[in-house]
Image: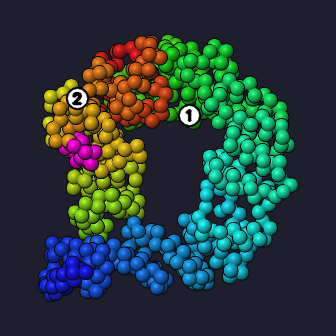
Amino acid sequence: MVKVDKWHFLAAGMLLITVSGAVKADSLDGQRQRYMQIKQAWDSNQMDVVNQLMPTLEDYPLYPYLEYRQLTQNLSVATPKQINDFVKSHPTLPPARSLPSRFVNELATRQDWTGLLSFSPQVPKPVAARCNYYYAKWVTGDQKTALNAAKDIWLTGKSLPGTCDKLFTVWQQAGNQTALTTLQRIGLAMKEGNTNLVSFLAKQLPPDYQTMRDALLDLQNNPNTIESFARTVGPTDFTRNAVSIAFTRIVRDDLDNARSMLPVLVRLQKMSDSDKLELEETVAWRLMGSDATPEQASWRDNVILRSHSTSLVERRIRMALAAGDQKGLSQWMDRLSADAQQEDEWRYWEASVLIDQGKRSQGETILRKLMQGRGFYPMAAAQKLGVAYPMQVSVATKPDASMAKLPEIARVRELMYWHMDNLARTEWTYLVLSRSPEQQTALARYAFNQKWADLSVQATIAGKLWDYLEERFPLAWTPEFRQATNDKGITQSYAMAIARQESAWNPEARSPVGAAGLMQVMPATAQHTVQMFGIAGYSNPAQLLDPQMNITIGTNYLEYVYQQFGRNRILSSAAYNAGPSRVNTWLGNSGGRIDAVAFVESIPFSETRRYVKNVLAYDAFYRYFLHQPAKVLTDAEWQRRY
């Protein structure tokens, strides 16, 4: 109690000084000081201080956030006009985007259904607000629209918020939740893997569906009851779908059993040829490993020959590449759809097949066209032709002086000052998305000029500005990377390429599995690397968000895997992403039979395959901007057999 009184006295005294000072010519430093004071007062629930300070900050860039806090703290008494005025005044402010939906829910809490529809003539997107909107329709007499919408919202495999219960209640009371619609939603829930929802819905089936209910619950709890399920329940679209979903689980756990029961399930459920093929494709995916027996491989290939799945055919092409099977490569390439054949990787391999068949002129024509693009395969095409890759860099629109005065830019700058970088990035993304393509390039260039590396990259991603290479690949933390790689085998450009791929230059990036910082170092990897190389000053994972420490640890680990794999960036990049043991397994499978590009394309993990291609291309881009141009692969990497 004494502490609060002392603080209140101190705050009041500071307030008198601050407010009187604000009458004079204001300064950014003064605004920042008052902003800090108002936040502290707000957190201490000293609303008299807040209310006195608020008018003195109307010109401060972050004032809209204070307005938002004030408005939402008193949302229960806010008026539609206040909400609309705020949103119109701040169309790109991130929290303003969700405010209308929040207010729809507030009006529903007030049971002001007419007011709700007047405030929101358009259907809100968030599901809770949507449910409230359509319930308002029902209350105000438009029951047909409300009930039709209720069904559309209800039919999902995802669990829905309790806010929707009142809408679903009137829909159910109108007799719209039939056994068939319940089964339909159960099917969607099974596809989503939402086991709790499946069980909940199954118990809602009427008494005459008891056999179905019991069979479904058994199937949900134990997929091995799939054959019993197929025998017990009559074949319908629903039961066939349920069998297909459960069959996927069987394939994961017991491949041989799945293959043996497949024809039985097809017969019992009277499945069509396309239904049968779908089950067979599920098995075929599990037979893509090098451990498939000759009989299994023959069965798998027969399925793929009948399949219309592009991804399945592409996986088989990669198997042929991994095995150095030129005949198989040509055969499976012919199975690709017309659209898939236009992808960079398959244009490259079409050219390679033609050259191997003695049709060099045709193959080289494809490669010359391919090398006009950007990325790994255009660069590999140039290297295969023995010519320099034609680096093409689009020039961004020059930002004019007015850009610095944009309120969004001012907010971004202030959010960075207060170390609220994630919110600054959100602000930036909303700003970029609100502008025309030409303005987006100017924003990307503005961020580049300000040395906001992550925002420069983010602008090119949000605006899909893929040809603006300088803004996509800013030279960030250059002194730190130069120093960190000075005594190592890895180059500065390679380390920067890894960081650019890992974090897009966001020093605060965190992955769902715990990797952190510019080079996305895992805490366990950091601890091991620090001990291995005697790196001083590291004591806890929070330090991975410090760029200098992250670069030090990340480059040492990258050097470790680079040397471990014979100074080969293909292998060290794959190891940095997927782990050294997996790379050794892949090398063992390919057995020195294939070239560099085939090895890259045959990496079985799509994430790692894409990662390696990106890093190699990014390295080439960074070498270009560092005035050290070179081929996408070194001679040693290109000539080695993998």
Q: Which residue is mark 2?
A: 532
Indicate whether residue 541 is drawn in magenta: yes
Is residue 391 visible from the viewing direction of this image?
Answer: no
* Total numbered badges shown on the rendered structure: 2
Relative vertical location of residue 265 with respect to residue 144 in this rendering, above or below: above
Residue at 46 percent across and 69 percent down: it is 98
Q: Which residues are magenta?
A: 539-551
Secondary structure mostly taken by the magenta-highlighted segment of the chain: helix
The spot of residue 146 in percent (x, y) is 69, 72
Neighbours of disc 1 within 10 Å: few (<14), some (14-19), many (20+): some
**Spatial distance from mark 2 to mark 1, Cα to Cα?**
46 Å
Question: What is the secondary structure assignment of the residue under circle 2?
Answer: helix
Quadrant assignment for the N terminus? bottom left
The spot of residue 6 in percent (x, y) is 18, 81
Question: What is the secondary structure assignment of the residue under circle 1?
Answer: helix
**Counting residues from the N terminus, which is met first, the one under dot 2 or under dot 1?**
1
Of the residues shown, which amino acid type is indicated by label 2? Answer: Met
Neighbours of disc 2 within 10 Å: few (<14), some (14-19), many (20+): few
The spot of residue 289 in percent (x, y) is 55, 22
Quadrant assignment for the C terminus? top left
Q: Quadrant of residue 200?
A: bottom right
Relative vertical location of residue 74 with respect to residue 293 in this rendering, above or below: below
Q: Which residue is mark 1?
A: 340
The spot of residue 512 in percent (x, y) is 41, 46
Residue at 26 percent across and 57 percent down: it is 446
Residue at 44 percent across and 16 percent down: it is 588
Instruction: Between residue 208 and residue 187, name the one nearer to us.
Output: 208
Relative vertical location of residue 322 with respect to residue 39 in this rendering, above or below: above
Instruction: Between residue 631 and residue 593, name the one nearer to us.
Output: 593
Is residue 579 visible from the viewing direction of this image?
Answer: yes
